[in-house]
Amino acid sequence: LSKIFFLLLIIYIGSSEAPSPGEEAPPPLVDAWLVPLVFGLIMVMGLAGNSLVLCVISKHKKMWTATNFYIANLAMTDITFLVCCVPFTAVLYPLPSWIFGNFMCKFVSYIQQVRCTERKETLWKKIATINNKIIA
């Protein structure tokens, strides 16, 4: 593994030519491949974990509680985020610009904002429910 890293470092240092005017500089080698690899690992682990949560909650009737439905909602939100946002963000690192067109740019941005807002509101609703149970 250290030999591969050393080889990649030599390639990166050796390919540090200045771009000609009007041409974008290529991203550094580490950013171009390591970050998407980490994003991919996070995506696979997130999809597996959240799918497992949804399977367990849906298969066992004892798990059908208000708290677990909040958790299932968060798992669905995570899955949507992992499928609709993470791959597109990961592709930005090795490529010099957005390649998916204007519609996908707006769609991915919209989904990112909606999912973050939905997650935040779900957590606040859960906190409010817990506080009401404690006070009552």
Image: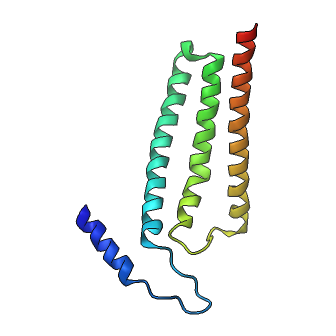
Q: Residue furthest bottom?
A: 21
Task: Give the percent coordinates (x, y) of residue 97.
Answer: 61, 73
For residue 55, above or below residue 92: above
Q: Is residue 108 left or right of residue 47?
A: right
Query: Residue at left 65%, top 26%?
Result: 70
- Identify the image quadrant of residue 126: top right
Q: Position of residue 112 (x, y in %)?
A: 68, 50
Residue 130 image position (x, y, % from top left): 69, 17
Q: 37 or 29, which is in the foreground?
A: 29
Q: Is residue 119 above or below residue 126?
A: below
**Residue at horizontal 38%, vertical 77%?**
12
Q: Quadrant of residue 131?
A: top right
Residue 3 placement, left or right of 63 = left
Q: How is the image coloured?
A: rainbow
Say which residue appears at 48% left-offset and 31% top-offset: 52
State left or right for residue 8 relative to residue 123.
left
Quarter holding residue 132: top right
How many numbered marks are there? 0
- Name the image quarter holding the C terminus: top right
Q: Nearer the viewer, residue 97 or 30?
A: 30
Quadrant housing the N terminus: bottom left
Front in this rendered view, residue 17 or 100: 17
* Left or right: 21, with 102 as reference point: left
Q: Position of residue 65 (x, y in %)?
A: 62, 16
- Residue at 68% from the left image edge and 56% from the top image edge: 108
